[in-house]
Amino acid sequence: MSESADGDLGVRVVALSWVDNAGISRVKAIPARRLEHANRWGVGMAPVFDTFLVDDSRAGGVGFDGPVGDLRLRPDLTRLTPLAAQHGWAWAPADRYSQDGTPYAGCQRSFAIRMTREAQARGIELRMGFETEWTVEEDPDAAATLSGRSGPGPAYGLARLTGSGPYLLDIADVLADQRIDLLQIHPEYETGQYEVSTAPESPVDAADTAVLVRHSVRALSARHGLLPSFAPLTTPSGAGNGGHLHLSPWRAGANLLHGGSGPYGMTPDGEAFLAGILENLPALTAIGCPSPASYLRLIPSQWAGAYQCWGRENREAALRLVTGQHGAADTANVEVKCFDQAANPYLLVGTVIAAGLAGIDEGLRLPPEYRGDPASAPPITLDRLGIRRLPDTLTASIGQLEESAMLRRAMGDRLVDAVLAVRRGEEKLFASRTPAEIVEATRWRF
């Protein structure tokens, strides 16, 4: 057994988690004494989970339905973490393998690993980090044991810490105990809404951390008698929870978004990487905005990044370039603002890498940046600049993914067909529901 799960820490059970194509974190748990066996032989689970929908029904489809078949979950012990908010438990992300021991073609985490290695083979290292936003409500079925009510107050208001300070302090302590490098933690825009930002890591580590942060927030919230929601929208009229992805491409220890002759000092490959993401954003919305609820959040003039454009520190652009302060230019990165936390983070980092590498392969260049809110510009201006609204429905984003030969090559048939089956299944599931009904049906699922 790994040293980090020894008996001194009281770990008795290990949760092995994976994230399905609907963005739901699923789990199987084993006694800690069985961890080495699971690492060698795996734990059985059915491939039918590939087409589970957000409500636990199944989309099915040829090759995805039925009771026959089995896969093996194998934990990644390098990320084995005792859970500071759940004494006796540890957590590890799991990869899915076929019975013959080869990586399963439908495994989202294995896809992210493969794309990370493909970038490394080209001499490119990606550094990524997620922002995690969530909204809490009091749990009517639980008696709070600690203070932590969100309370009314201004957006980002210091006054809100008088009620939520102990809650956020506990979250910060739990993340530190789990060796998560916390950058920021604070009240967000809506009442009862908070945000955590973590330090950049490798793409797979960043996705692992996103899963662990959310689980840690859930466990800690329960102690405070609170219910957290990471859903794209928790009230029909709210601003919603984003899942912004920050990233920067590096080569030989140098940030490719700094030190070059391109826009704001980008190198040619740094610019091409961002241009590849920007060009493929309509298809990427089917990955990063996967729920019908996502499109209730992805609207103009709400800092959601609803337009396919980029700009320095432009929070209405889908790609917000962060150049860094004077003297710290190697911290330059780009924030992809249009994504939310209904997304599977492994699919997200893998497809973003694929898009960026395609941009390098094609030698793409960024169009002129847009300064301001595109929604305020005349349509003729946007047409002239080639700025389009990103897909505004799940149906539209499905069509973009279906047409993306690049993402099909990168993901492989098994994985992309499973994702499309789930998207079509949820499109049908919510087709007749009102926005309020969609919000209510999804807000406690993420």
Image (cartoon, rainbow, N blue to C red):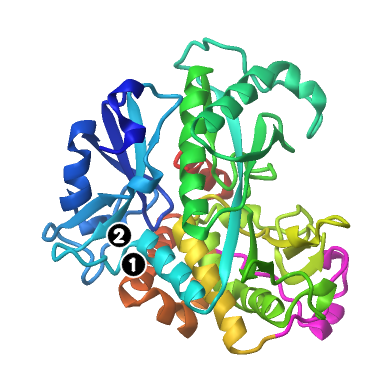
What residue range appears in magenta?
365-393
Q: List the residue tagged with mark 1.
A: 418
Q: List the residue tagged with mark 2.
A: 50
Q: Residue 437, can we see it?
A: yes
Left or right, 235 with respect to 118, comes to right
Using a 10 Å C-alpha cutoff, classify the residue at mark 1 as few (fewer than 14 neighbours), some (14 to 19) or many (20 or more). many
Which of the 4 quarters of the picture holds residue 67?
A: bottom left
Q: Residue at x 82, y 76 (%)?
A: 263
**Horizontal and vertical percent for residue 330?**
75, 61
Q: Residue at x 29, y 69 (%)?
A: 105
Using a 10 Å C-alpha cutoff, classify the residue at mark 2 as few (fewer than 14 neighbours), some (14 to 19) or many (20 or more). many
Q: Is 49 drawn above or below residue 111 in the view shown?
A: above
Q: Residue at x 51, y 62 (%)?
A: 348
Of mark 2 and mark 1, the one earlier in the sequence is 2
Amino acid under disc 1 = Ala
Residue 401 in magenta?
no
SS at circle 2:
helix
Residue 367 in magenta?
yes
Q: Is 129 drawn above or below residue 399 in the view shown?
A: above
**Horizontal and vertical percent for residue 264?**
84, 72
Q: In terms of depth relative to the viewer, which is nearer, 285 or 198? A: 198
